[in-house]
Image (cartoon, coloured by chain):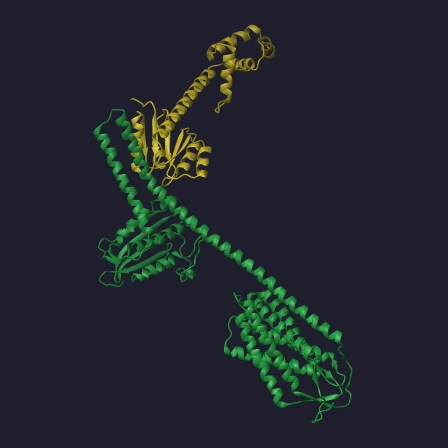
Chain colours: A yellow, B green
Amino acid sequence: MSEPESIVFVVDDDPSVRRAIKRLIGCVGLQVELFGSAQEFLASKVPNVPSCLVLDIRLPGISGLNLQHQLAKANIQIPIIFITAHGDIPMTVRAMKAGALEFLTKPFRDQDLLDAIQLALERDRSRRRQEAELAALRERFELLSPREREIVAMVVSGMLNKQIAAQIGTAENTVKVHRSRAMEKMQANSLADLVKMIQRLQVSPSKSP
Amino acid sequence: MISANGALSCSYDYGEVTRSVLIAIVASYAALDVAGRVTAGKGRARLGWLGAGATAMGIGIWEMHFKGMLAFHLPVPVEYHWPTILAALWVAILASAIALYLASRPKMGWAEALCGGVIMGAGIVGLHYIGMAAMRLPAIARYSPLLVTCSILLAILFSLIALLMAFDLREETRWTVPRRLGSAIVMGVAVSGMHYTGMAAASFIPASPPNLSHTVSISAVGNNAIAIVTLIVLVAAMVTASVDRRASAVVERINQDLEQDLTRVTRVVAMGELVAAIAHEVNQPLTAIVTNGNFCLRRLDGATANADELRAAITEIVNDGTRASAVISRIRGLLMKGAARRTELDINQIIQDVTILLPNELTRNRVSLRTELASDLPRVHGDSVQLQQVLINLIMNAIEATRTSTDGKREILIRSAKNPDGVLVQVQDSGPGIEPELANRIFEPFFTTKAKGIGMGLSISHSIIESHGGRLWTTPSSNGALFEFTLPTDAAGVS
């Protein structure tokens, strides 16, 4: 099976607008999937590839803004580009505050939409990359033994081997061995590297080490 | 000193007479002025004006009489029994109150005017002769029956004229002040005429000195002081009336401004909604056109053009262009208010035309609209634009009604059917329905239950359907509101 490199989802209730957008995006070689309503989009299976959502504000049933809210609640982080036939300022503010990437008024300039899509895909790609890195880092951290984690935490806080040995009541050499094994497992080349890694794990929203 | 018939000879101080007439005129003017305020006032304000006005007017008339009596000189000393004078004042105030009350009522028929004239005239006659009875002098008054009758008739006539004038002049119009002044002069002269006729009716025969208990003799200073106090009271009444009139004019203007603002806001809101609807309906096809056009340009520029692909995009451009222009011509059709153009038409077509215009409103309010249209309907004779207006009005009302629907169901059903009269169209919604006590009033102009409504929609719809020879009504229904209208078929030929 060949997963596409990236994909653009378009949700608009007007079929002819949908088709036109698909043609335009197809022009720059991107894969497009069309939906007539928010419900249809929610019911579909979204492949796990860099993607973005081109979303009409005014939709039958669940509105575009409502869909944005639901996706955020479900922690689905897909960049959203809103398009609307008549947007007012409060609507725009609401959408942008809720994290929309762009807000285009119909009829929009083709380049504006394509630029926004490129930017959105780029964002999604980098977010996915970071997430993958973080996941790998976490996996590596899981490999550490409890003692190694304890020592890493002290190292990162700036304690010397001697101090660590005194605190946990062991020989300095033992600390050194644990420490170098932990560095190896974490694939850290230097102490600075290790500090950065642990920091990233600590600020990441999911479970802290 | 003593004339042929044994009566005391008497003379008038003409300066005093003139002053008494002037006071009568001022009192009349004040009365007319206050009558306007009593009319304009409501509740307590009205009662207050009636009381204050009657007091001022009564004092004015009383003082006129009193001054008239002081202008009358007899060769014997005259004193006045003051409790009787006060009684005369009360009678004057009472008569004034009745007059003001009558003149400020919404309507005054001949019977009321006549009755009022008699009561008021009796009051003035009473005031006059009670005033005369207060005189204490060494003489006996004799009255000439003819002149007394004359004075009574004059009093009634004067009162009648005064009532009619006050009634006529109570509304504030352009020439109010000069007209009031003219009327006040007529009234003032008339009341003085009555008084001096009454005075002329009396002759005084010398007799033994009177009982002088409870009497006062009025000095020249006292005489003037009473006149000045009276004038002050009258002027105060007029000034207050004028201030009150201005204040209420300002309040009225503010109210009018507010009302105009409200109408303007409502209109702007309605226009804004219409413009937004047009913008949305037209922007959709335009977006597709622009996007498809851009696609074609990119393909052509990139020299990777594929004829089939381009043809598909251009076909859509043409279709969307047609769609946009159809939206615009429908809206223009809706807004054009020319003379009614009656043609033979299919009511189902009109229902469909209208529903094409509304998806936007329906979507926004999450209302689903169903139609059940009978296929074998006879054609009706009518103006399609006006009939569209009626349907849009009924549907927009239905949309608003479903917004308050309690069970969350938001449905509108439009049905068309054959009917003995011609065709029948029903618009039913799933809203809370119409309260039975309001059902009779909803077609009245300016009757509305909406916060922003102006109460014209159903009233206009009603007259449009009636001008087509049909009927528009509402039927009690277990499920929301049901509006129905009939239109006669072509064969029935009513239009």
- Residue A156 locus on image (x, y percent): 55, 14
Q: Quadrant of residue A100?
A: top left
Looking at the picture, tell me which residue is in the foreground, B449 or B296.
B296
Q: Residue furthest top?
A: A173
Going by the image, does B141 lie left or right of B281? Answer: right
Is B94 in front, or is A174? B94
Question: Taking the image as drawn, is residue B286 in sight?
Answer: yes
Q: Is residue B383 above or below residue B361?
A: below
| Residue at the spot 61% in from the left edge and 89% down from the top edge | B146
Asked if residue B360 lies left or right of residue B307, the reply is right
- Quadrant location of residue A162? top right
Residue A46 image position (x, y, % from top left): 35, 29
Res A209 seen here: no
Quadrant location of the C terminus of chain B?
A: bottom left
Residue A166: % across, % down: 61, 10
Q: Nearer the viewer, residue B269 or A148?
A: B269
Residue at x-position 66% and y-position 77%: B18
* Left-right relation of A100 to B69: left
